[in-house]
Image: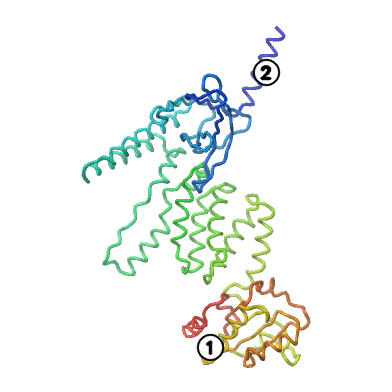
């Protein structure tokens, strides 16, 4: 009796501690090694979750005390992906014939997964019929049958993981553009696209993170965002999409990182502000989603670039001129000021300076003066640079006292760093553009 009680206790303990049990019955040799894994959003990488050997009956029993995250899973042997199945329940079984795994698959213990298997089998049958169809009319009928199949499945499983998965694969119907469309029509189309193109993606369903489709949906969407949109427009777009995700969710982190990477160092005017706004709102203010290293790097980056964003007053620069006198930036009495931060030994700086000197008469006609800031501290080499590159028409200054941190105070770790300021020293541009572009900017004001 005592032994029976001990055995009963062990069984109860095992049942309580087992968080999942997936039994798969296929024809295979004993001790053959199999793995279950879920795909990453890129559709190429998979994340292994459990590995087992087949028993004498060809059964694979995956079980463990750690809960499996729901999503779309693969059964893998070696490097071969055998079949997919949705994991929405924790205790179920799959039986399949290796001669035709998908056609023969039967799932017990997970009604949603079983219905999805039936759906997959029928959709594959329709796909074969579509490929063999003789004419457009027949293909159209098959396509309508397929759409009815999807709708029927989604009606049966509303808001389920598999319904959200299928819906994400369905593109949103967009308004048509014709050859006669006007610019106004195109703008309306783009506004509709930005607002509705991701309507079919359930951004509040973290299970979609464990499917192979997200990158294929989100990346094209982001690539179609015109970087020349006003920063406020892009920020509002990001806010609207991120607001559809759950706080502290994997999908929220995914969307923040996707938007952040899109607008990090694009070389397009104003995109640095988009990155700062997104990082401040969704990384610095929601730190539980990110590592300490990520948070610290973003803090440092934001602190470096935020003061130098377009629309800000550029911090004063109290540097000395060739006579050793203080010549502050804010005392430049110019309609426009180009601030050039350079290193006299830098080849790119030398090339830019040569072009600037040649082009300067056109810029000077627009009311521009140049505040030429040397990062180095060797006075003789600095004076040699001024003479060789003929920058005497500019206000040449250097940090003789070595008190300025150009890299962090003025975001000038990469040189030459160029800023265009208005008469109030407001930053109009913080990128190194073609000199003709600077001329156009001033002409447009």
Secondary structure beneath label 2:
helix
Q: Is residue 303 left or right of residue 249?
A: right
Q: Residue 353: horizontal and vertical position, in percent?
A: 60, 84
**Of the residues tagged 2 and 1, which is closer to the observer?**
1
Q: Residue shown at 47%/85% (left/top)?
A: 443
Q: Is residue 118 left or right of residue 50?
A: left
Q: Residue 275: horizontal and vertical position, in percent?
A: 57, 63
What's the CA distance linking mark 2 and mark 1? Answer: 85 Å
Q: Residues within 10 Å of mark 1 (few under 14, many from 20)?
A: some
Residue 5 sits in quarter = top right
Q: Earlier in the sequence, mark 2 or mark 1?
A: 2
Q: Residue shown at 54%/70% (left/top)?
A: 267
Residue 394 sits in quarter = bottom right
Q: Residue 423: horizontal and vertical position, in percent?
A: 58, 86
Secondary structure beneath label 1:
helix
Q: Residues within 10 Å of mark 2 (few under 14, many from 20)?
A: few
Residue bearing mark 1: 359
Q: Is residue 317 left or right of residue 203?
A: right
Residue bearing mark 2: 10
User: Which residue is farthest front?
Assistant: 29
* Label 2 with label 1: CB-CB less than 8 Å: no
């Amino acid at each position: 009796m005592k032994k029976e009680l001990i055995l009963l206790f062990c069984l109860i303990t095992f049942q309580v501690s087992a968080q999942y049990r997936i039994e798969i019955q296929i024809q295979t040799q004993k001790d053959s090694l199999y793995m279950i894994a879920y795909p990453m959003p890129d559709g190429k990488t998979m994340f292994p979750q459990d590995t087992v050997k087949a028993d004498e009956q060809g059964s694979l029993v995956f079980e463990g005390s750690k809960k499996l995250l729901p999503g779309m899973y693969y059964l893998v042997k070696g490097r071969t992906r055998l079949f997919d199945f949705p994991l929405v329940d924790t205790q179920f079984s799959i039986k399949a014939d290796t001669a035709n795994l998908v056609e023969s698959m039967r799932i017990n213990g997970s009604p949603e997964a079983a219905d999805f298997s039936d759906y997959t089998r029928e959709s594959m049958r329709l796909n074969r019929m579509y490929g063999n169809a003789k004419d457009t009319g027949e293909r159209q009928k098959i396509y309508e049958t397929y759409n009815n199949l999807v709708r029927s499945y989604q009606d049966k499983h509303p808001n389920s993981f598999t319904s959200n998965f299928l819906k994400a694969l369905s593109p949103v119907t967009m308004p048509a553009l014709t050859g006669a469309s006007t610019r106004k029509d195109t703008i309306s189309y783009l506004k509709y696209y930005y607002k509705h193109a991701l309507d079919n993606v359930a951004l509040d369903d973290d299970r979609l993170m464990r499917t192979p489709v997200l990158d294929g949906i989100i990346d094209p969407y982001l690539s179609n965002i015109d970087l020349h949109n006003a920063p406020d427009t892009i920020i509002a777009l990001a806010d609207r999409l991120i607001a559809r995700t759950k706080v502290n969710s994997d999908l929220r982190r995914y969307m923040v990182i996707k938007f952040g990477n899109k607008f990090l160092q694009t070389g397009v005017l104003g995109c640095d502000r988009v990155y700062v706004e997104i990082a401040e709102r969704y990384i610095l203010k929601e730190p539980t989603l990110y590592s300490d290293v990520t948070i610290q790097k973003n803090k440092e980056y934001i602190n470096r670039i935020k003061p130098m964003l377009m629309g800000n007053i550029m911090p004063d620069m109290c540097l000395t001129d060739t006579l050793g006198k203080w010549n502050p930036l804010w005392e430049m009495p110019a309609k426009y000021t180009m601030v050039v931060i350079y290193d006299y030994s830098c080849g790119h700086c030398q090339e830019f300076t040569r072009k600037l000197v040649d082009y300067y008469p056109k810029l000077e006609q627009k009311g521009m003066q140049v505040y030429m800031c040397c990062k180095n501290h060797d006075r003789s080499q600095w004076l040699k640079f001024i003479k060789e590159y003929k920058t005497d028409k500019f206000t040449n200054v250097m940090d003789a006292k070595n008190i300025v941190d150009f890299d962090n105070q003025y975001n000038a770790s990469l040189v030459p760093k160029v800023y265009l300021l208005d008469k109030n020293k407001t930053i109009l541009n913080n990128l190194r553009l073609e000199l003709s572009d600077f001329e156009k900017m001033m002409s447009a004001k």
